[in-house]
Amino acid sequence: MQQPDPLSATFAALADPTRRAILARLALGEASVTELAEPFHISQPAISKHLKVLERAGLIEQSRHAQWRPRRLRAGPLRDVAHWVGQYRRHWEESFERLDAYLRDVQERQEQGNGDDHDGDTDRPR
Amino acid sequence: METTMTATRIDRGSTETTTIYSEGGDLVYERTFDAPREMVWKAHTDPEVIGRWWGPHGTTTKVAEMDLRPGGAWRYVSSAPDRDDIEFYGEYLEIVPPERIKWTFMFDVEGVGPQGGPETLTLDDIGGKTLMRAVSHMGSAEVIEGALATGMVGGAIETWDRLEALLAQG
């Protein structure tokens, strides 16, 4: 199953170290293509290609007011996505912990035989 | 267990209790529970039991919909004191009691829209214990790289945001 959703586009854009470095630079303020190309030993067209990918993922935008059209970061989507990734990991890890505790609890109760585990489908809501 | 070719496993920050790795376009969480498989299965398919463990600490989960058959819909509502409710929802794709559930796992990210994709949950009976494996099919290794890099980049940007705010205070 393919999912060409915005989040995948964001993740794909972030998978490249040059593009991450560009974002890190833009986090400090807007910059021109020439400025962005400076720290990398790659051509300006190559940088432009990276910028296009970032732009399509909604991570950066061109400001229109200046003639040299500097790029700037759109931190919003990135922050949402980063938040989600953290949440997702936490979701599973902590759910597993809770499930573990729950299973132990149920088994202990069964072992103690304090009950009613076999008279029908009683599930004892608490 | 079937094996597909030999995609490389890359550890993605396993903890003492949980093994986390990526393999091709899949992100995998594995953990062994000291309980029989039937019981772990029930914990995943009984709405009342799900409410007792599903979600991070400090959250509560209500099962709003659970039509446990292929094509059936599911919807969980997760509540926490410090945020608005979050809904997780999707569709069951495959149900094989007591060992496998394949479903789509979706949620809405503000400003981005519905997100998520197919996941497979497998329960293996390993001598009275249960090996549980949750696989998120993210599509490509590239997507996984990016997802994991996001945490770093996002964290760095938040730090810069705070620095900026601090500097702005003079």
Image (cartoon, grey):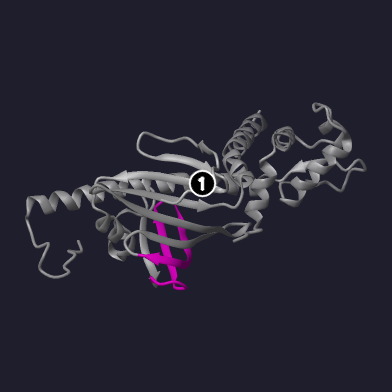
Amino acid type assigned to the residue bearing label 1 in the image: Leu
Q: Is residue B41 above or below residue B126?
A: below
Please provide percent x and percent y for residue A124: 17, 64
Q: Which residues are magenta?
A: B68-96
Q: Position of residue B75 (x, y in %)?
A: 43, 66
In the displayed structure image, the side of residue B106 where residue A119 appears, left or right: left
Total number of numbered labels? Answer: 1
Residue farthest to the right, as pictured: A67
Residue B98 can be seen in this image: yes
* Residue B66 image position (x, y, % from top left): 38, 70
Question: Residue at 41% of width from left, 61% of height from top?
Answer: B101
Principal secondary structure, stretch drawn in magenta: strand
Which residue in the structure is indicated by mark 1?
B27
Q: Which residue lies at the image location 45% right of the left edge and 67% below the top edge?
A: B92
The quarter of the image holding the C terminus of chain B is top right
Image point 36% across, 33% down: which residue? Answer: B16
Q: Is residue B85 left or right of residue A16?
A: left
Q: Secondary structure at mark 1?
A: strand
Tell me if A14 is positioned left or right of A51 in this view: left
Callout 1: chain: B
Residue B39 location, quadrant: bottom left
Left or right for A48, reference A120: right
Q: Please say whether residue A97 is one of the residues in the magenta stretch.
A: no
Does residue B57 appear anywhere in the picture? no
Mark 1 Cα within 10 Å, few/some/many (few <14, many 20+)? many
A122 versus A110 height, above or below: below
In the displayed structure, B138 sits above or below B74; it is: above
**In the rendered image, the vertical position of residue B100 relative to residue B57, given as above or below:** below
Q: Quadrant of residue A51?
A: top right
Q: Which residue is nearer to you in this view: B125 or A113? A: B125
